[in-house]
Image (cartoon, rainbow, N blue to C red):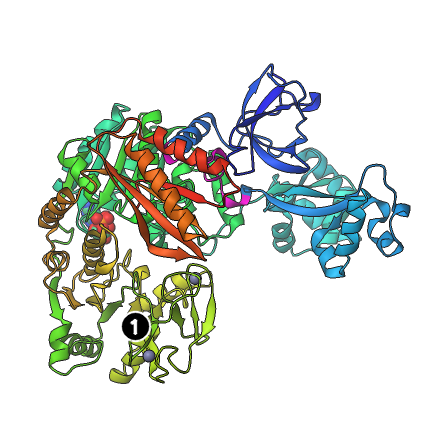
């Protein structure tokens, strides 16, 4: 096996296939499928993934692999196959499919360097460059830029004296620590101690330490334990009585925390009924998808924990997915509390190095459970016993860049390979999942009641139009204001929720209604109070708020929309005695601040927690008795067929924050459209009726779960080019699908221009189209090959964002 098939780190159509490389003698038997290697590609050295080995190649002149980057494969056989499946099912480049399965730290970074070309000498270069290239050094491109010698370098490169190379650099180093251990036997140590001169009492103490604990110990710990110095220890190392060595240690992001260990709770009857079929599937090593449908606080997590317990006892492993924003320390504690060090946690709050360490624990089989956000579904376990997706309805489980995968689909694909169950949990299941459960594709398990037998909090819906009519122009209804005041007097806590999604602060002229848009994108600029600037969230364009309206010259041009800061200000005016903690992207940017703010709130350091989506989940504090939703309907007006579903889910979720313990909870929902069914039914906690209503609408309009969707988006700088290309695509699709399919387009995208590129789309709705993937792939291939035209075509199979 002297040839390796390698997927190279160049994401283009032309390079989206395996290339054959010759394995030099020294690496034969070492290089294996699933390892990363450094390979020459064109003029550069880049990274690639070995996907297979073979004895012969159909190509004659093969280049050689330069070196392996791993000592053991980073992708096992199952994950390599999963990569192929991802490539096929999401229509992405192979290299993206492999990269997405690895922690960011293992994604290659390239360093640009300049070196003397082969055959050239320092003397060939002009004098000013000599110092840079003496002793064969590689010059950092960054340094070259700083020194202002780039033009000189370019001239010399053109003459063939210099060349630019790219070096693959690993992003993180494994963290090493110094350890000390005895270099001789225990008997010899005891003998040696007497030979040490009395004046070197410190050295004797160190040896006594090792006689008592004949084991390895970290150098730092040794020095503190014996109260000695590094030089004393080194002296003994020089005498060859002790030995110093380095060992990999993990950065432990949870180091400062202790976890209170918990024991399995005796399950209630409802929980027993629900867990039965899961345990049964585990017993039989049987693949099955369960939908665990239960309101917040109904005991789903305890079911997850006990199912995992069973999996661990069988010697297998578990993956638990939790949406990024719900991955709070509280959530993590529940798993660490039950399974201690057997749990690895993967979330975006960790540094690249910490994430890599957690991933290594999984790879080295030191843990049994991985808890994490979306990408944790690729945890490199080899003996999976269960995969659990909590809050399965969350759209953050869909990745919005290549590969555009949904974690639920990946889980099911992996579970089939491992013959194991998947548990999807939610209080408000996605319509897709609930419909599958109704059709018995998924096995429905229900937990109808809250654990504490508390009824769900009472919800009152306030019509804000009515408030306005009666002269209340504040963002707080009179009722909400009264209740906030009441809670402060009773020393109970409130949560105020501001729905920011689809609702940003924009700048508008009060006289003529002119809205300031981005000059590059057809979308309004977002006002940022911090620097008093307006910014485009799509292309990054920034500008100051104009003093006068560009249309009518009125000076009444100002920003609209309510940000959390503005709410905080208003609270300060109307309830000056309230202590408020604000949680949004601005206050939680720094590492650990999220946790600190929550702890402060939990410790009673504030009366009101004010925040965005971020606070909708996972909060479980006994003293919260009031939840206020400031603007329930901002999401309803988005061009998204899931808008009602998302509104219902979010309101239900937020309401669930109140009254989870002894004290009963109340919820106030403020809205301008109280009659909308998603708001009304969320107020009545009626998922079943919501499901029925929404299903009817989906059926009428040919949307999921009745139809599948695929979205093709085309963009180009010239409007004409976009429209005609989209037309061609639409007619190609039409001629390749059955009559049952609906092909819409060409139509301008809801955001018709981003970064000066016009955007058009074709939306396909279909039921059974066995050839659809092939058809879409043909379209992609066609346009990806043709890079000169400047057309960009992207395809999202089962899209969650239609903009
Ligand atoms: P969910 O995940 O559905 O929101 P949890 O599993 O968090 O619900 O349960 C809600 C509360 O009830 C938690 O405080 C949990 O510790 C408690 N709980 C769950 N199951 C039991 C049980 N069998 N006996 C006693 N308390 C339980
Ligand atoms: Zn104006
Ligand atoms: Zn823009």
Q: Is residue 29 visible?
A: yes
With 753 as the anchor, is 463 left or right in this view? left
Image x and y of residue 317, in percent: 37, 33
How many badges with numbers are in the image? Answer: 1
Disc 1 crowd, CA 10 A, few/some/many (<14, 14-19, 20+): some
In this view, 549 is above or below 155: below
What span is in magenta? 89-105
Q: Is residue 414 visible?
A: no
Indicate yes or no whether the magenta region holds residue 481: no
Q: Residue furthest top?
A: 55
Q: Quadrant of residue 398?
A: top left
In this view, 36 is above or below 758: above
Q: Residue at x 76, y 60 (%)?
A: 147
With 613 as the anchor, is 196 left or right in this view? right
In this view, 622 is above or below 122: below
Indicate yes or no whether the magenta region holds residue 90: yes
Q: Residue at x 61, y 39 (%)?
A: 215
- Check disc 1 and report the residue beneath it: 562
Q: Quadrant of residue 419?
A: top left
State ligand 3's quadrant. bottom left
Of residue 158 and residue 502, the one placed in the foreground of this image is: 158
Image x and y of residue 371, in percent: 37, 44
Q: Quadrant of residue 285?
A: top left
Image x and y of residue 532, in percent: 44, 76
Badge 1 residue CB within 8 Å of ligand 2: no
Helix, strand or loop at mark 1: loop
């Amino acid at each position: 096996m002297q040839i390796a098939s390698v997927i190279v780190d160049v994401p283009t159509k032309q390079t989206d296939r395996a290339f054959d490389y010759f394995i030099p003698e020294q690496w034969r038997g070492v290089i294996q499928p699933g390892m990363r290697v450094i390979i020459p590609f064109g003029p550069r050295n880049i990274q690639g993934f070995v996907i297979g080995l073979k004895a012969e190649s159909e190509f004659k002149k093969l280049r050689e692999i330069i070196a392996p980057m791993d000592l053991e494969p980073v992708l096992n056989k199952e994950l390599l196959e999963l990569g192929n499946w991802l490539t096929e099912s999401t229509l992405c480049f192979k290299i993206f499919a492999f990269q997405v399965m690895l922690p960011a730290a293992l994604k290659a970074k390239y360093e640009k360097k300049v070196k003397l070309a082969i055959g050239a000498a320092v003397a060939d270069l002009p004098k000013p460059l000599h110092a840079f290239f003496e002793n064969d050094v590689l010059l950092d491109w960054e340094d070259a830029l700083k020194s202002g010698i780039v033009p000189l370098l370019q001239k010399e490169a053109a003459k063939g004296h210099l060349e630019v190379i790219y070096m693959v650099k690993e992003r993180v180093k494994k963290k090493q620590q110094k350890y000390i251990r005895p270099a001789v036997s225990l008997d010899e140590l005891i003998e040696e101690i007497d030979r040490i001169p009395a004046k070197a009492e410190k050295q004797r103490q160190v040896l006594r330490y090792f006689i008592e604990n004949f084991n390895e110990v970290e150098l730092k710990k040794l020095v503190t334990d014996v109260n000695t110095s590094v030089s004393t220890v080194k002296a003994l190392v020089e005498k060859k009585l002790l030995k110093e060595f380095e060992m990999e240690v993990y950065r432990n992001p949870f180091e400062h925390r202790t976890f209170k260990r918990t024991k399995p709770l005796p399950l209630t009857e409802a929980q027993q009924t629900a867990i039965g079929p899961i345990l049964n599937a585990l017993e039989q090593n049987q693949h099955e998808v369960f939908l665990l449908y239960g309101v917040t606080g109904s005991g789903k997590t305890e079911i997850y924990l006990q199912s995992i317990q069973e999996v661990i006892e069988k010697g297998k492993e578990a993956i638990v997915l939790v949406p990024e924003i719900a991955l709070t320390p509280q959530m993590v504690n529940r798993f660490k509390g039950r399974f201690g060090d057997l749990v690895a946690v993967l979330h975006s709050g960790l540094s690249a190095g910490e994430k890599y360490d957690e991933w290594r624990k999984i790879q080295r089989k030191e843990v049994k459970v991985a808890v994490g956000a979306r990408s944790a579904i690729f945890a490199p376990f080899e003996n999976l016993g269960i995969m659990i997706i909590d809050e399965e309805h969350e759209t953050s489980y869909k990745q919005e860049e290549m590969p555009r995968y949904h974690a639920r689909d990946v889980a099911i694909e992996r579970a089939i390979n491992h013959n194991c169950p998947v548990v999807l949990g939610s209080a408000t299941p996605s319509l897709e999942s609930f419909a599958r459960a109704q059709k018995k594709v998924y096995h429905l398990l229900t937990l109808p009641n809250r654990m504490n037998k508390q009824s769900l909090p009472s919800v009152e819906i306030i019509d804000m139009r009515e408030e306005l009519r009666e002269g209340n122009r504040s963002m707080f209804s009179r009722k909400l204001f009264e209740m906030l005041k009441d809670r402060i007097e009773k020393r109970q806590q409130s949560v105020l929720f501001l729905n920011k999604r689809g609702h940003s602060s924009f700048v508008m002229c009060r006289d003529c209604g002119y809205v300031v848009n981005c000059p590059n994108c057809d979308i309004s600029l977002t006002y940022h109070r911090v620097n008093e600037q307006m910014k485009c969230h799509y292309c990054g364009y920034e500008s100051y708020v104009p003093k006068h309206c560009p249309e009518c010259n009125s000076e009444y041009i100002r920003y609209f929309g309510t940000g959390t800061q503005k709410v905080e200000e208003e609270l300060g005016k109307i309830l000056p005695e309230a202590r408020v903690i604000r949680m949004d992207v601005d206050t939680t940017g720094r590492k650990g601040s999220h946790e600190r703010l929550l702890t402060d709130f939990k410790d009673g350091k504030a009366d009101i927690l004010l925040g965005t989506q971020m606070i909708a989940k996972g909060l479980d504090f006994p003293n919260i008795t009031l939840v206020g939703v400031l603007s329930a309907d901002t999401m309803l007006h988005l061009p998204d067929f899931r808008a009602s579903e998302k509104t219902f889910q979010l309101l239900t979720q937020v309401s669930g924050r109140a009254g989870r313990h002894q004290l009963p909870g109340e919820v106030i929902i403020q809205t301008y459209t109280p009659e909308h069914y998603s708001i009304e039914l969320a107020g009545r906690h009626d998922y079943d009726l919501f499901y029925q209503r929404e299903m009817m609408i989906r059926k009428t309009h040919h949307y999921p779960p009745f139809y599948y969707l695929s979205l093709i988006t085309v963009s180009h700088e010239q409007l004409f080019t976009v429209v005609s290309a989209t037309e061609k695509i639409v007619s190609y699709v039409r001629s390749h699908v059955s009559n049952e399919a609906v092909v819409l387009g060409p139509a301008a995208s809801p955001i018709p221009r981003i970064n000066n590129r016009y955007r058009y789309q074709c939306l396909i709705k279909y039921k059974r189209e066995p050839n659809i993937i092939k058809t879409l792939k043909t379209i992609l291939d066609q346009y990806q090959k043709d890079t000169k035209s400047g057309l960009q075509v992207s395809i999202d199979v089962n899209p969650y964002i239609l903009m």
